[in-house]
Amino acid sequence: MSVSAASPRPNAGPWAELTAQLPAVTLVMGRYLDQTAVTLRPASVKATDLALRGFVGFLVEHRPDLTSIAGIDRETIEDFKLFLARSVTATGKPLATNTIRQRLRLIKVFFDRIIEWDWPQAPRRNPIVFGDIPPRPDPLPKFLDDANAARFMQAAYQQDPFRRLCVLLLARTGMRVGELCDLDPDPVVQIGDCHWLRVPVGKLRNDRYIPLHPHLVEDIATHRQANREHIGRHGFLLADRTGRIDRHRVTRMVRRVAKQAGVGHVHPHQLRHTLATQAINRGMRLEAVAALLGHKTLEMTMTYARIADRTVADEYFAVTDQVENLYTNRLTADAEGPNMKRLRTEHQRMLGNGWCHRPAQLDCAFESICETCVHFVVAIEFAPTLQRQHDHAATHHQPQRAALFSGILQQLHQENHDQ
């Protein structure tokens, strides 16, 4: 296909002015956007459109001499990276790292594709390399702790029926905002004694059924009865006299509830994070959480396990007292000087091949573990070492250890006498 067969996209709307100045560049991008629209979701195409338009806007000012996409070289990309780093939003804030990352990644994919497709306008190689794209941040999910979550839910129940339904659906199902807005007019299915909610195809291109809380079953039925006309007109469950709900309206609802609850700023996606964290904290298996949230891999779900690992917490608190004793002993020894150090030395344990300098106040689960093991075997040639260990324990007021070695020595001499 030649450039002349490209879509009229670059000749209309925000592309028109850019096309007048760099037509050879924008026509190729218009053709590319039409190709991506065949396979990608509308939101992905929109993000690509925005990234490419921003790039062309930069080229208009810094490379107005361009006559082909192939003329975009490495130096141009380096200048564009600096341009992004210095750019600000409408509120005067620097562009977020995620925004810069997304724009560079989408432009890199554009070059990758047209090179792979053997378009005659493509450069010989991609001028954007992997190292140009900032690493993806991997922060822990933001969630409400149990106390704030309880306050938020109490405030949600005090809202008008429509707002309460929207917010509770998010909080009790873990749906994404886009999935919430796209719910079918009648998404509830009863299987046996349980009601299930059919979540539409969403971000990961998969739909799923999730169990529905009985209160929500009643609220959905009440809403459908009261708004039958609006639901029928718009073709979605969450519609009322003002029209079909969108993500911006949902965000305003959540923020309003959070403000009334006094829990600070809350974004709708935090309710999803909160549900997942609460579920894992209370023992729900990762596989079940993944199915609930619509994750395709457990790697996605493991993010929540990082902040809800009860095993780590339990083991940490199990040794906290011993660790505190260790620190306390060390600080006391440093504060009181040679006397405390001498006391710690006097409590050292004599081993068969060395010394244990564990403070006396600090318990050790492995003390004399070998000598008390059923597999412990000793011969008469070790009697001198065992005797020294016995004498050392007796001198340092360790009666249990002294008794242990007395028993071993007595048994050893008896066996040697019998032979």
Image: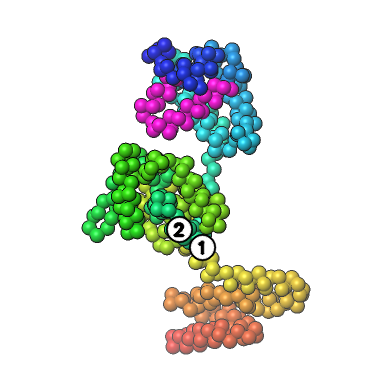
SS at mark 2 in the image: loop
> Label 1 to label 2, Cα distance in Å?
17 Å
| Magenta stretch holds residue 50 | yes
Pointer 2 local density, CA inside 10 Å: few below 14, some 14–19, many at least 20: few
User: Majority secondary structure of the magenta segment?
Assistant: helix
Camera-side residue: 319 or 192? 192
Q: Which mark is residue 158?
A: 2
Point out residue 262 in the picture as x, y percentages from the top left corner. 55, 57
Does 188 sit above or below residue 361? above
| Magenta stretch holds residue 240 | no
Pointer 1 local density, CA inside 10 Å: few below 14, some 14–19, many at least 20: few
Q: Residue at image x 65%, y 85%?
A: 395
Residue at the far left in the pictured view = 192
What amino acid is at disc 2?
A: Gln
Tell me the residue that label 1 is attached to.
147
Point out residue 52 in the picture as x, y percentages from the top left corner. 51, 25
Which region shows up in magenta? 30-58
Q: Nearer the viewer, mark 1 or mark 2?
A: 2
Q: Residue at image x 25%, y 54%?
A: 190
What amino acid is at disc 1?
A: Ala
Which of the two labelled residues, at mark 1 and mark 2, occupies the earlier sequence position?
A: 1
The C terminus lies in which quarter of the figure?
bottom left
Q: Residue at image x 51%, y 15%?
A: 19
